[in-house]
């Protein structure tokens, strides 16, 4: 990825304003373009203003809480010797509880301007899953565009558009064939220079094919869809940043087989704003909308004004985020306590060494 100015990587006033005049003169901003188990891949401009790609060890953050670890899209401040100083404040952050049984917070992407939620016009389409993605974006205050792919394999795409338009009449929706340049051009307004967009969706919905088209090359390996069940094969294995033809930056993510909500109550409430509005009319202020009398939400379901599926998903996501947030908070406090212990031990070791 060749750059001549940090703006091309998404650098803007939000990040610039965090630096003092001294920091501007003595340090270098680098953007995280990839994260491996023990390495952080970064891109920026060196002291001579030349594009520099480098790898940093994650060792510097070994005692930090998970939310303080660098993730793809972050900005790091390095010294003139290209050693890490600190992580800049994030504009936005997408996170989840990590897959598996361990209660660990996983950071997916930072400093995203627009999220392309990608799904396909076939059996892969799921309103429940889309609402999960929308809540994630709402919590992070990121603009969303739903991209419906594989329109060339669908006889009637209006079925999928209408299903989304009913609960979200103002939601931007683009229906495309990801291999058609004219279709993909409809996304250009969100991919201009200085803008960072991310692709989020389950495996096989066409994210890598879409990335190829936005880049104008075949930099990502894509897998053909299976005809039997309309499911594509997983092709992206790690999160990474890519430069687009229009000058923007795009983050591709692996297909999310498990996307557990955490610290996302406000995002869920925003995604289900219609239910939240109905809830204000319930007779009991602590109504759970399950079986209480004079519940305005349940009355809306009975009247056909609210889908039972939508209410069920609302309950499911709220319960999930409450459960996960509690367990992650407990793990977070354990990590912080361990981090404090290591820092105190390190400080004590320095004091004893100075006495010698």
Image (cartoon, grey):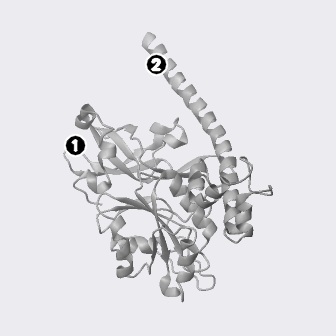
Q: What element carries label 2?
A: helix
Q: Nearer the viewer, residue 192 or 337?
A: 192
Q: What element carries label 1?
A: loop
Considering every residue shown, the one lying at the far top of the view is 355
Any mark on residue 47, and which? 1
Let me know if residue 260 appears in the view: no
Neighbour tally class for label 1: few under 14, some 14-19, many 20 plus, Cα within 10 Å: some
Q: Quadrant of residue 300?
A: bottom right
Q: How far apart are marks 1 and 2 (CA)?
A: 32 Å
Residue 295 falls in image quadrant:
bottom right
Seen at 33% across and 38% down, the residue is 18
Outermost residue on the left side: it is 48
User: Looking at the picture, does residue 26 appear above or below residue 15?
Assistant: above
Q: Can residue 124 be seen here?
A: yes
- Please give the name of the residue rendered at 55% of the width and 79% of the height, measured from the top-left corner: 121
Q: Residue at x 35, y 49 (%)?
A: 31
Residue 138, compared with residue 346, is above or below; it is below
Is 207 displayed left or right of 12 in the figure?
Answer: right
Instruction: Give residue 298's position: percent from left, percent from top.
Output: 74, 62
Residue 350 numbered mark, or none: 2
Question: Disc 1, disc 2: CB below 8 Å?
Answer: no
Asked if residue 48 is positioned above or below residue 208 in the image, the reply reads above
């Amino acid at each position: 990825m060749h750059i001549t100015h940090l703006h091309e990587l998404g650098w803007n006033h939000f990040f610039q304003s965090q630096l003092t005049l001294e920091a501007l003169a003595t340090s270098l901003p680098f953007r995280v373009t990839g994260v491996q188990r023990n390495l952080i891949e970064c891109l920026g401009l060196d002291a001579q203003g030349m594009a520099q790609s480098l790898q940093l060890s994650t060792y510097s953050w070994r005692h930090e809480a998970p939310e303080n670890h660098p993730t793809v899209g972050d900005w790091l401040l390095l010294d003139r010797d290209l050693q890490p100083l600190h992580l800049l404040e994030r504009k936005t952050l997408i996170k989840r509880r990590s897959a598996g049984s361990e209660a660990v917070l996983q950071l997916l992407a930072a400093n995203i301007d627009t999220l392309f939620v990608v799904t396909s016009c076939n059996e892969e389409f799921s309103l429940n899953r889309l609402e999960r993605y929308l809540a994630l974006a709402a919590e992070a205050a990121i603009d969303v565009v739903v991209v419906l792919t594989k329109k060339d394999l669908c006889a009637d795409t209006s079925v999928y558009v209408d299903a989304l338009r009913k609960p979200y009449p103002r939601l931007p929706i683009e229906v495309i064939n990801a291999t058609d340049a004219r279709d993909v051009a409809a996304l250009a307004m969100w991919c201009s220079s200085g803008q960072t967009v991310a692709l989020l969706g389950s495996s096989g919905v066409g994210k890598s094919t879409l990335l190829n088209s936005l880049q104008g090359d075949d930099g990502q390996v894509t897998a053909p869809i299976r005809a039997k069940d309309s499911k594509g094969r997983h092709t992206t294995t790690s999160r990474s940043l890519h430069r687009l033809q229009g000058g923007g930056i795009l983050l591709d993510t692996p297909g999310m087989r498990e996307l557990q909500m955490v610290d996302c109550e406000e995002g869920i409430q925003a995604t289900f704003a219609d239910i939240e509005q109905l809830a204000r009319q319930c007779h009991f202020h602590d109504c759970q909308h399950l079986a209480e009398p004079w519940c305005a939400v349940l009355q809306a379901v009975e009247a056909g004004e609210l889908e039972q599926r939508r209410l069920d998903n609302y309950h499911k996501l709220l319960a999930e985020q409450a459960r996960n947030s509690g367990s992650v908070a407990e793990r977070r406090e354990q990590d912080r306590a361990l981090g404090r212990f290591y820092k105190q031990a390190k400080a004590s070791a320095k004091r004893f060494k100075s006495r010698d």
